[in-house]
Amino acid sequence: MKYTLRFMLLALLILAAAGCSKKEEKKAGDMAAPHGQTQRKESVVVVPDNVKGKWKAVKIAVTDKTANKEVVYTMPIGADFPLPGSDMVVRVENFLPQFSMEGTTLTSQSNEPKNPAAQVRIMEGGKELFKGWLFSLYPTTHAFQHPKYGFTLVDFVPAS
């Protein structure tokens, strides 16, 4: 009797464990990325009401690495800016004066420029080369890599 009870308990434990692993496999399979790719959740940018409309432009220093020359351009938020002397277009999509990240949500903790960041999209010949963030306090963090040009967020322009 003892052995039968032990055997039944062991069988129940095995079945319960198998059932759990099947569910886990299914969940993992549902979320799996195609072979060779890692799955990344898309970030969501939330511009708080106390920040919306308070900034009209950012100033981005563009370094021409081949000519060893830097020019600062004032680029309006939400508009395309054709980069003079190139077939590149820069679009400042968002500006967050106090950038913060909570999970996949990117937002601003306040309207004070304590950790300024600009979300930019850089196109060349109609092809997207970069979509990411420029940080004025951390210019090399996730910096856009291009053989000829470098981009740095240097200032921001409040709305009048």
Image: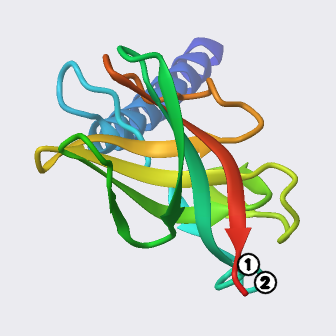
Q: Is residue 118 above or below residue 19?
A: below
Q: Amino acid at mark 2?
A: Asn
Looking at the image, which residue is at 18% across and 31% down?
34
Looking at the image, which residue is at 44% across and 73% down?
78
Q: How many marks?
A: 2
Q: Quadrant of the C terminus?
A: bottom right
Q: Amino acid at mark 1?
A: Val
Q: Nearer the viewer, residue 39 or 58?
A: 58
Q: Position of residue 100 (x, y in %)?
A: 75, 52
Q: Position of residue 122 (x, y in %)?
A: 33, 46
Looking at the image, which residue is at 74% across and 52% down?
116
Query: Alpha-carbon distance for marks 2 and 1?
Result: 4 Å
Q: Is residue 51 above or below residue 45?
A: below
Q: Is 110 on the left-hand or right-hand side of 76? A: right
Q: Which mark is residue 64?
A: none
Q: Is 96 on the left-hand or right-hand side of 60? A: right
Residue 44 seen in this snapshot: yes
Residue 104 seen in this snapshot: no
Q: Which mark is residue 50?
A: 2
Q: Quadrant of the N terminus?
A: top right
Q: Contact, CB < 8 Å: mark 2 with mark 1? A: yes
Q: Secondary structure at mark 1?
A: loop
Q: Position of residue 86 (x, y in %)?
A: 22, 40
Q: Secondary structure at mark 2?
A: loop
Q: Nearer the viewer, residue 10 or 151?
A: 151
Looking at the image, which residue is at 42% across and 36% down?
24
Q: Which mark is residue 51?
A: 1
Q: Nearer the viewer, residue 11 or 156?
A: 156
